[in-house]
């Protein structure tokens, strides 16, 4: 591999496309004749304004975001949204959450501090190894929104069909699947994604929110916690995460250059298939997620024992495949194969695991 880089299977922060890293390197000391690095630039300068404007425009283009949605770049990662969402969107103080794993549970815990949370469905009975049927949930008429985590990064399950919200606003955490495939934005009231899984460095979230959900009657809320603050200020109420916005802007351009989200999805399906086909054939390794809910991004799998799991993790690390240890709530291993993981990385990992299995049979 060029630059002697490792295939990094981390759940996040994670790999970035190499052409993007190379461009950033080339612009490091002097961004396009500005005489400075983007890190050193005033966010109020014309040159930076162009960077943030282009990032938003390219994202709108990639996802086909309708004009009645705002795109906001907010700090605090995806985690701050667990609080901002109920604070801003609970008008009647009531929301339905679907409990599908670690990240939806965290969101539920924060929402409970703000209002009433109704668990519309849960997959807790099988350690969150599937997405429950949400075609006919009990949703009270005065529910403010229905909340899902569309790809559970730790448990490795993903929604194939969105829930039937019965006309209520859908809010989705897309952190670990953002821009991995086409998305029909108007199916949602709000989409958000911490950017360090699929599109950039950590410390920021992209929020895509329908304008009518942005309220101006929340003057008692801390100013930074109001979507209106960020919407009115073009994501520059305070100094934004200038660096992350610059980097994700490059990733958006890169995705456009390879053919957009249709092409990205094609590549992601191909990559994931290689790994799942191996897991389905293997006698040593087993995927932990029901087939119909398998994620294209995060693939957890186990052997028959914790000892063997640990042995495999150590062997992969020694061979140059990093960050494959599974999260403690699932155990075993987890391969995160986000947009920037090349197909060669997955092929190499599968070859390695095959050999390991043969040698330990
Ligand atoms: C990583 C992750 C988060 C938390 O992101 P931070 O930026 O660390 O706050 C939230 N939701 C999902 C689905 C994630 O994968």
Image (cartoon, grey):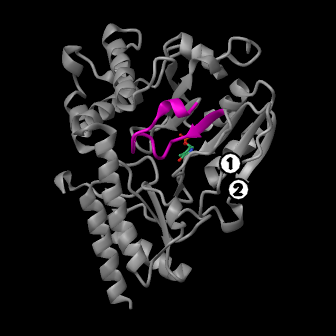
Residue 98, label in figure? 1
Mark 1 secondary-structure assignment: strand
Q: Which residue is drawn at 57% across and 17% down?
A: 211
Prevailing secondary structure class for the magenta stretch in the rendered image: loop
Disc 2 residue crowd, few under 14, some 14–19, many 20+, Cα 10 Å: some
Above or below, 78 against 31 in this view is below
State the image coordinates of residue 293 (x, y, percent, origin top left): 53, 59
Mark 1 or mark 2: name the one nearer the start of the chain: 1
Above or below, 335 against 47 in this view is below
Q: Which residue is drawn at 52% across and 11% down?
A: 233
Q: Give the range drawn in magenta.
A: 169-188
Is residue 195 shown left or right of residue 28?
Answer: right
Is residue 231 shown left or right of residue 221?
Answer: left
Residue that mark 2 sits on: 122
CB within 8 Å, label 1 to label 2? yes
Mark 2 secondary-structure assignment: strand
Nearest to the observer: residue 332 or residue 266: 266
Nearest to the observer: residue 272 or residue 234: 272
Above or below, 72 against 328 in this view is above
Which image quarter holds the N terminus?
bottom left
Q: Is residue 105 visible?
A: no
User: Ligand 1 shows up in which quadrant of the image?
Assistant: top right
State the image coordinates of residue 172 (x, y, percent, origin top left): 58, 39
State the image coordinates of residue 195 (x, y, percent, origin top left): 45, 37
- Quarter occupied by residue 260: top left
Residue 308, label in figure? none
Q: Is mark 2 within 8 Å of ligand 1?
A: no
Q: Is residue 291 magenta?
A: no
């Amino acid at each position: 591999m060029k630059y002697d880089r490792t295939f990094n299977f981390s759940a996040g922060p994670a790999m970035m496309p190499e052409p993007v890293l190379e461009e950033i390197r080339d612009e490091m000391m002097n961004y396009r004749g500005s005489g400075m690095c983007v890190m050193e630039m005033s966010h109020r300068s014309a040159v930076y304004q162009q960077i943030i404007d282009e990032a938003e425009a390219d994202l709108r283009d990639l996802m086909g975001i309708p004009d009645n949605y705002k795109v906001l770049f907010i700090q605090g990662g995806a985690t701050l949204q667990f609080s901002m969402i109920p604070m801003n969107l609970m008008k009647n103080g009531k929301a339905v959450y679907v409990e599908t794993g670690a990240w939806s549970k965290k969101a539920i815990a924060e929402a409970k501090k703000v209002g009433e949370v109704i668990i519309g469905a849960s997959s807790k009975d099988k350690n969150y190894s599937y997405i429950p049927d949400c075609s006919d949930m009990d949703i009270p008429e005065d529910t403010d929104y229905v909340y899902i985590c569309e790809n559970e990064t730790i448990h490795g399950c993903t929604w194939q069909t969105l829930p039937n919200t019965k006309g209520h606003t859908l809010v989705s955490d897309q952190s670990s699947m953002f821009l991995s495939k086409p998305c029909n934005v108007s199916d949602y009231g709000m989409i958000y994604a911490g950017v360090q899984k699929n599109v950039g460095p950590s410390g920021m979230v992209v929020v895509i929110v329908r304008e009518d959900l942005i309220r101006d009657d929340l003057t008692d809320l801390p100013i930074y916690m109001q979507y209106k603050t960020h919407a009115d200020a073009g994501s520059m109420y305070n100094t934004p995460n200038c660096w992350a916005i610059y980097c994700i802007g490059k990733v958006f351009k890169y995705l456009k250059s390879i053919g957009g989200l249709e092409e990205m999805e094609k590549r992601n399906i191909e990559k994931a298939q290689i790994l799942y086909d191996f897991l389905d054939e293997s006698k040593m390794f087993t995927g932990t997620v029901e087939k119909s809910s398998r994620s294209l991004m995060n693939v957890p799998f186990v052997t028959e024992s914790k000892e063997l799991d640990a042995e495999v993790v150590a062997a992969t690390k020694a061979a140059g495949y990093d960050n494959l240890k599974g999260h403690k709530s699932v155990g075993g291993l987890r391969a995160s194969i986000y947009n920037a993981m090349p197909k060669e990385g997955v092929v190499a990992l599968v070859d390695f695991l095959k050999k390991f299995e043969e040698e330990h049979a």
